[in-house]
Image (spheres, rainbow, N blue to C red):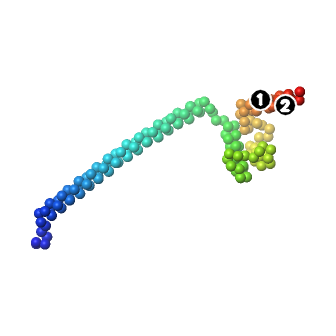
Amino acid sequence: MWGSWIPYQENARIATLITALAEAQANAQAAAEHFAAEQARLQDEMEQRIEQIQKQLETERQSLEIRWKVTDTDLRYYTHEIRELDRYRAFGYSDSASPSDESQIWNNAHTATLEDYKPGSELSILYNEEAIAAMNAQDQREYEKDMRSFE
């Protein structure tokens, strides 16, 4: 019976430790709840920002669709250029470099890529009217320049 007896000071010290432990646990719980609330506010803020960005991008996309309709010609030209780039890569060229227009590699890659569309002599397969008009104007300027050199 005396072996299980704890002096009064020990009881008080144990009670103080138990109280301190309970307070520490309560503080830890409060801190965890506070942290979770802070995280939730941060999360909410970031989610709101992402929603705003998505709305802005959707508005810009709709505006762009109104101003600029992507045509089949645009898509064919884009695809042509990507396929041509893939062929250049196969020959070891980087994305920022391409062979000279007079090289056999350029001719083979360009011709093979054109064959994907079987365009024949129809420029409008890959080029829109504005691009064809610009090319014709450039050809005309070069022709006139060449003619002046013969005078």
- Quickly name the residue at label 2: 146
Residue 127's mark? none
State if disc 1 and disc 2 touch (CB < 8 Å): no
User: Of residues 3 and 126, which is closer to you in this image?
Assistant: 3
Total marks in image: 2
Rendered location of residue 137, percent (x, y) = 77, 29
Rendered location of residue 104, percent (x, y) = 80, 48
User: Of residues 139 and 111, which is closer to you in this image?
Assistant: 139
Q: Secondary structure at mark 2?
A: helix
| Furthest-right residue in this view | 151
Give whichever of discs 2 and 1 has the lower sequence position: 1
Mark toward the viewer: 2 or 1? 2
| Residue 14 in which image quadrant | bottom left
Q: Residues within 10 Å of mark 1 (few under 14, many from 20)?
A: few
How much space separates mark 2 and mark 1, taking CA atoms?
A: 14 Å
Q: Amino acid at mark 2?
A: Asp
As drawn, 150 above or below 103: above
The answer, for residue 50, to whether it is visible in the render is yes
Side of 24 where 61 appears, left or right: right
Q: Residues within 10 Å of mark 2 (few under 14, many from 20)?
A: few
The answer, for residue 108, to whether it is visible in the render is no
Query: Which quarter of the figure is the C terminus placed in?
Result: top right
- Quickly name the residue at label 1: 137
Query: Residue visible at 79% across and 47% down?
Result: 103
Rendered location of residue 57, percent (x, y) = 52, 36
Q: Secondary structure at mark 1?
A: helix
Query: Residue visible at 12% across and 68% down?
Result: 5
Query: Which quarter of the figure is the N terminus placed in?
Result: bottom left
Query: Residue visible at 76% across and 36% down?
Result: 123
